[in-house]
Amino acid sequence: MIQEFDKTSKFVLKLISMTSLSNTAQQIRRDIVRMVHGVQSGHPGGSLGCTDFLTALYFKVMKHNPAFNMDALQEDVFVLSNGHISPVFYSCLARSGYFPVSELDSFRKLGTRLQGHPTTHEHLPGVRIASGSLGQGLSVAIGAALSKKLNQDDHLVYSLHGDGELQEGQIWEAVMFAAHNKVDNLIATIDWNGQQIDGPTEKVLSLGNIKEKFDVFGWTTIDMQGNDMDDVVAKLELAKSLTGQGKPIAIMMHTLMGKGVDFMENDHGWHGIAPNDDQLAKALGQLEETLGDY
């Protein structure tokens, strides 16, 4: 078992070592390429790039309970705004105990709970909002954070966003609102990989210096090397230490799209296509099986 459960608090006990975290991330990357290949549909690039972050969050940093309740009272909340990277999200949920790992084999199949974008009507444990309509997740995360304040719940809300998603106007309305209302129990992370479905973000619609924008809007910002597990854990812990000080926190997470599979890395073409049989074999050859395939 990677994790154990505290019988009193029901939270996952974070006993996992850094080596085990890296091994878990490796297995999750195997899950991602196998899931997308299995139905010849899905989004491997961003999923692979965000694997280290989500592994650290679910297996080390976040206080969460796989028994799962929608209200998330007295536990941390995660909001996946860029819902197209559902493969990494589903793998993290399954391997941290929310549902059987074997269910990953049902990814994107008709009538299953693991749809291409997370949905709530399927009642999949771990999914609190339907996501993938880009630009909306930060508003949802702010609402969840304010709800915790009203309930005098001192747990945190985490959210994840693609950098291309920041081209949506609703994001900046939410950024202003969070700073103005001192939503300081929120940690939003931006996957700053410079790629989106139509090409490099600089060519599609330049984002400029994202960190400076959040700084000017009144957030506390942190830089993270998102494919360095040590730095991911360290910066998440730093972000936690900066909550409760009157400002929302934004992490600028620098990643490589397709991280871990050399022919996918930093290539926007792998945003939303599946590997063929030969490509899958090559990818799996670069990703060691550490926990057992589903």
Image (cartoon, helix red, strand yellow):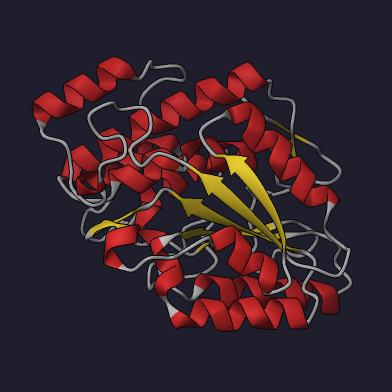
Total residue callouts: 0
The image shows residue 180 at horizontal and vertical percentages of 76, 83
On screen, 106 above or below 293? below
The image shows residue 225 at horizontal and vertical percentages of 57, 37
On screen, 101 above or below 247? above
The image shows residue 193 at horizontal and vertical percentages of 42, 48
**Between 229 and 13, the one nearer to me in the picture:** 229
Residue found 62% across the figure and 25% down from its top: 2
Residue found 23% across the figure and 52% down from its top: 272
The image shows residue 24 at horizontal and vertical percentages of 52, 26
Quarter of the image with the C terminus is: top left
Say whether residue 69 is left or right of residue 266.
right
Say whether residue 101 is left or right of residue 156.
left
Residue found 77% across the figure and 73% down from its top: 183
On screen, 150 above or below 230? below
User: Could you say which quadrant of the image residue 1 lies in?
Assistant: top right
Q: Is residue 10 visible?
A: no
Say whether residue 65 is left or right of residue 167.
right
**Between 70 and 208, the one nearer to me in the picture:** 208
Q: Is residue 249 visible?
A: yes
**Between 111 and 138, the one nearer to me in the picture:** 138
**Between 159 and 169, the one nearer to me in the picture:** 169
Say whether residue 40 is left or right of residue 230.
left
